[in-house]
Image (spheres, rainbow, N blue to C red):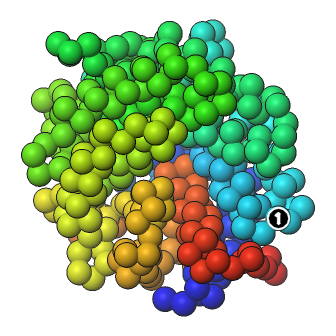
Amino acid sequence: MSEINIRKTFLKLRSYCESQQFKGWDPYDGLNSRLFQAMPFSKYRLPRLAWIQLFKRSPINLRPLVGVAKEYNAKGIGLFLHSYCNLYKNDPRDEYLARIKELGDIVLTLRSKGYSGACWGYNFDWQARAFFQPKETPTVVATTFIASALMEAYELTKNHDYLDVAIDTQHFILKDLNRTYDDDGDFSFSYSPLDHTQVFNASLLGSRLLSQIYTYTGDGELLEAAKKSVAFACKHQQENGAWAYGTLPFHQWVDNFHTGYNLECIAAYQLHSGDYSFNDAVEKGLTYYLENFFTEEGIPKYYSNQTYPVDVHTTSQLIITLSRLDRWEENKDLIEKVLSWTITNMQDKKGFFYYQLKKTGSSKIPYMRWAQAWMFFAFSEYFLKEKETKNEPRTKLETTN
């Protein structure tokens, strides 16, 4: 697929997201339903799980019928913020700088209150199998992506509010998240302050954030904690290079984009710390990732052992992972093949990307955080990496009519 067509594809996506003012629905926002909240069983675990799964799995968007509004999702805003930073670095236009300031200010207003440091959660109650999280309960996942975006925004705007808030997230990571230790004293960060689960990608995102903050503060305590949490995750890597999602019995699946998270987080820790003692885990994990999650036709597989559902997040994460691991040029054919397949099969004529394709009952609902923000971010990484590898001065991305 030509770079010109990729740019046109991105501009269609950008036009859609900007027309929606970056607000939208989410696969997991079913509990925001005013109808469900009025029901007597809405406080119980099983009905909440069933309701969320109904909305997540339904190929028909039921949200307008039951009172689920389009809203800002803090993590989604963070991804858009990081994306516009990438676009500005690629082509320093005033309109991109204005978006950076707009989105940076929005995400600061979405912080969760009452914790040891700056942090963010989701704009909906969320019932998982392992725990329940009320709306705006902060998570290490949302916090890491947003803080990373704020650091990028600071580098371009020199607005110290962005950097100060990003640095402040260290207190949330170190003081509010629970830890599970192994016999060596290494540990896993919890997903949120309300659980004790060991989810490898979540814990590694905490490691990544601490190592990023270290580059500004030089505080060795941050690297020490980051290294212990990286070591914990690497001990749980399987011999073939894979990671299960977590340690609980019902977390034993191996999936595409969480594997990508793990790889880019360990690589980020190594980059910021200068400690490359975990590089064997990265190499083994990357080999497994590339050999097991993409078909010859360019279809990105969700799970290592089956193709469907095809989730758009798997495509975005491929681009991000190979960019962050600096494995772009040797995998360019795969990138182009997967991106071309995704654009052909998963982009709507209105510009947005579908959530998931299945053998039956595909979900083509335009989720803002899960699909649009991630693909927007992936395109921005793609353009930056192409500029870097071709040593071009900058890439013009003309506006749409």
The kind of residue tagged 1 is: Pro
Q: Secondary structure at mark 1?
A: loop
Give the side of residue 280 with respect to residue 328, left or right: left
Q: Where is residue 347 drawn, in percent x and y?
A: 50, 74
Residue at the spot 62% in from the left edge and 15% down from the top edge: 117
Q: Where is residue 185 drawn, in percent x and y?
A: 26, 13
Total marks shown come to 1
Give the side of residue 11 with respect to residue 64, left or right: right
Q: Residue furthest right?
A: 94
Instruction: Classify residue 357 by image quadrant.
Output: bottom left
The image shows residue 383, relative to residue 264, as above or below, that is: below
Residue at the spot 56% in from the left edge and 40% down from the top edge: 145
247 or 353, nearer to the observer: 247
273 or 190, nearer to the observer: 273
> Is there any visible trace of residue 46 in the rendered image?
no
Give the side of residue 94 with respect to residue 189, left or right: right
Quarter of the image that includes the C terminus: bottom right
Q: Residue furthest left?
A: 239
The image shows residue 178, relative to residue 118, as above or below, that is: above
Residue at the spot 44% in from the left edge and 70% down from the top edge: 328
Q: Badge 1 is on which residue?
A: 92
Q: Where is residue 68 drawn, in percent x and y?
A: 57, 40
Give the side of residue 154 with respect to residue 368, left or right: right
Instruction: Classify residue 106 by image quadrant.
Output: top right
7 or 121, nearer to the observer: 7
Instruction: Classify residue 136 by image quadrant.
Output: top right
Crowdedness near tag 1: few (<14), some (14–19) or many (≥20) residues, C-alpha within 10 Å = some
> Is there any visible trace of residue 154 in the rendered image?
yes
Q: Where is residue 393 drawn, in percent x and y?
A: 74, 77
Residue at the spot 69% in from the left edge and 79% down from the top edge: 392
